[in-house]
Amino acid sequence: MATAVELERAHGAGHGDDHGHADHPPTSTGLDHRKLLMWAFLASDCMFFGSLIATYMIYRGRAEDLGFAPFPSEILDIPYTSLSAFVLLMSSLTMVLALAAIQKGDHRGLRIWLAATALLGAIFLGGQYFEFTEFYHEGLSLQTNMFGASFFVLTGFHGAHVTIGVIWLLTLLFLSLRGGVKQEDSLDVELAGLYWHFVDIVWIVIFTLVYLIPYDEVTETQTGAFTYLAGILRGVASIF
């Protein structure tokens, strides 16, 4: 008959570091449940931005058709926005370096690259704020025309996502400085990286569709005629 010691040894067999049953995956897909939840969130955010982009494309060119200036061809500064886009894309590289650093246990590298990513994101936000301010001074707002409404809603929501990402990165940086992010916690940095790369990819799509595709130019004669017609319509509407 087996002794108690032998039973204990038999029970413990296979539970060492190198032998026995493998660790079960957190979910049936083999992904950690937090990563699975992040992918689900990003999928829903894809649909959200997809609806905003579709709305913008549907109303693209309506400002020129109706004659309500300012028009996209008059105020969009592609070289300036290209620089902002480059800054945001470079932040994806620094995010990758931050994740690689914590996976190797390099806490100093993690802090450097997290700070660099947050800084690049903040520079992008500052550039967007400057662009919005300039557009407003040139007469473009949410109420000006369909271009203004769809443009500010689309790029504004993207800017809000970047802001959330910067706050997330700064939070990770603060936790790391207090010793709260260890090598085994690399998934926390990876989740932030997934979100940040998503935001960058969305901006590539927005930048291509909003800025790079040419708009119809409206001549001064057309603008004058549109303005005159709009004045007549406003006068008629005021009567009723």
Image (tube, rainbow, N blue to C red):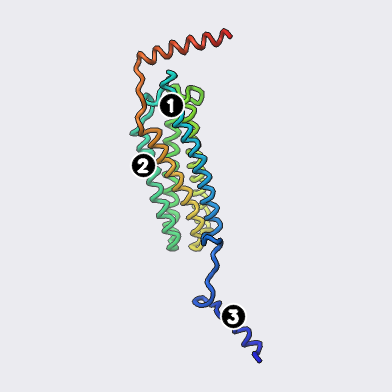
Q: Residue furthest top?
A: 239
Sequence-wise, the earlier of marks 3 and 2 is 3
* Quadrant of the drawing holding the C terminus: top right
Q: Which residue is mark 1?
A: 135
Q: Secondary structure at mark 1?
A: helix
Q: Is residue 179 visible?
A: no
Label 3 and label 2: CA atoms lie apart by 56 Å
The amino acid pointed to by label 1 is Phe
Q: Nearer the viewer, residue 172 or 91?
A: 91
Vertical order, 35 against 145 (above or below): below
The quadrant the N terminus occupies is: bottom right
Q: Residue furthest bottom?
A: 1
Is 56 positioned to the left or the right of 15 in the image? left
197 shown above or below 186:
above
Label drawn at residue 12: 3
- In the rendered image, residue 60, in percent from the top left (x then y), is placed at 43, 28
| Residue type pointed to by label 3 | Gly
Q: Above or below — where is 207 with respect to 220?
A: below
In the rendered structure, are the residues bearing label 1 and label 2 in contact, judged by CB atoms less than 8 Å apart? no
Residue type for callout 2: Phe
**Residue identifier under label 2:** 86
Q: Quadrant of residue 147?
A: top left
- Percent from the top left, x then y, of residue 216? 36, 24
